[in-house]
Amino acid sequence: MYKLSDRINNMSTSQTLAMAAKTRELKAEGKDIIGLSLGEPDFNTPDYIKEAAIQAINDNYNSYTPVDGYVELKDAIINKFKRDNGLTYDRSQIVVSTGAKQSLANVAMVMLNPGDEVILPCPYWVSYAEIVKLAEGVPVEVPTSVESDFKMTPQQLEAAITPKTRMLWYSSPSNPSGMVYSKEELRALADVLVKHPDIIVVSDEIYEHINFVGEHASMAQFEDMYDRVVTVNGVSKAFAMTGWRIGYIGAPAEIARACNKMQGQITSGANCIAQRAVITALEAPVSKIQYMIDRFKSRRSLIIDLMSQIEGFAITEPEGAFYVFPDVSYFFGKTINGYEIKDATDFSMFLLERALVATVTGDAFGSPNCIRFSYAASEAEIEEAMKRIKNALSEA
């Protein structure tokens, strides 16, 4: 028996990755599982990006990269921020990392001291709370609901702030709810934050381009917030490049330097071939990936239509990303075909075992009444999954 650290013993396993592993295990046993748990586009990386990677290999890019990213990639990121978000950064404010998850971890490690509080509007992405705790911070959950479209109000934000509050983390479009904060809604939150100048905001915008309601809004666009916002983004979702592992931040230069220092001792620079490919991805017009966004929007309509026909699912229509996050508390306390449903985790396991459909419990996202479905799957899989669920629940 090895004595592991308290740090790892106290850390929760990623529920999205755990469900994905369970799905693979059941498939290996021959079970026909439909996986709607993992937030991964089912498209191939576009050819023009793959060709850039092949060219980089042929050009002999094989050496260590600068810790904070190739200058050419940083310039492409700067131009992207200006073109898509109206944000002006210089090279000293950009850090390229091995995925947006590392970007988030870097920020937490360089900004938080033991006991510092981080406000997390619920539902939040599954790793936020664990990253904060790893950095010895304290997650402060602000509950929202399907009735409020899973959005935190300015009044809730104000009520959550204490003398120990150091940061606010949120994502828009949201994983797992798919909600999108409008410019006006962000301004209302900013009006609270300007009264608390020591609070730093992490704006996770990884789903920026998968937006079905109009122009994307960034918290850093407000002049009175610009110097207090770390904008996190990457290429995994909109460009179907999850395995390429490239994320980045635009941040105040002092925070960026600190992240560079941290990364220099943990992983150093991100993969050289992937970085060269991402230059091409970001320099291309967004219209080149519009076909994927259009398909996600079509799938959203399909899954919402089918799910709305199942009694007990309370749904708010997602405005972006590729998730739907129904409230399933209707089923709590019921026994369905001999299976007792006490909470969302039970319900998620029921769907896996009885309907052979993999989802993720809302407990993982700080919203215990909900479960998350990813519709980054084919239309045929979505239709079959909803049919199976409806049949499995017919004895409720």
Image (spheres, grey):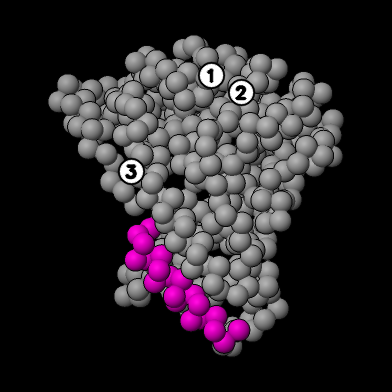
Classify mark 3: residues with Cα within 10 Å, few (<14), some (14-19) or many (20+). few
Classify mark 2: residues with Cα within 10 Å, few (<14), some (14-19) or many (20+). many
Residue corresponding to mark 1: 87
Residue corresponding to mark 2: 220
**Image disc number at residue 291:** 3
Q: Quadrant of residue 337?
A: bottom right
Q: Is residue 101 left or right of residue 30?
A: right
Instruction: State yes or no: residue 379 in magenta.
Output: yes
Return the disc, 3 or 2, that comes first in the chain's sequence.
2
- Residue at the (51%, 53%) spot, across then down: 323
Q: Is residue 377 above or below residue 121?
A: below
The answer to whether the residues at label 1 and label 3 have Cβ atoms under 8 Å apart is no
Q: Please give the range of residues in magenta.
A: 377-396
Label 1, label 2: how far apart the Cα atoms are: 7 Å
The residue sitting at the left extreme is 58
Classify mark 1: residues with Cα within 10 Å, few (<14), some (14-19) or many (20+). some
Return the disc, 1 or 2, that comes first in the chain's sequence.
1
- Residue at the (82%, 23%) spot, across then down: 195
Return the disc, 1 or 3, that comes first in the chain's sequence.
1
Instruction: State yes or no: residue 242 in magenta.
Output: no
Q: Nearer the viewer, residue 360 or 392?
A: 392
Count of numbered circles on the image: 3
* Three-letter amino acid code at the position of disc 2: Ala
Asked which secondary structure carries label 1, the reply is loop
Q: Is residue 104 visible to the viewer in this orientation of the structure?
A: no
* Three-letter amino acid code at the position of disc 1: Leu
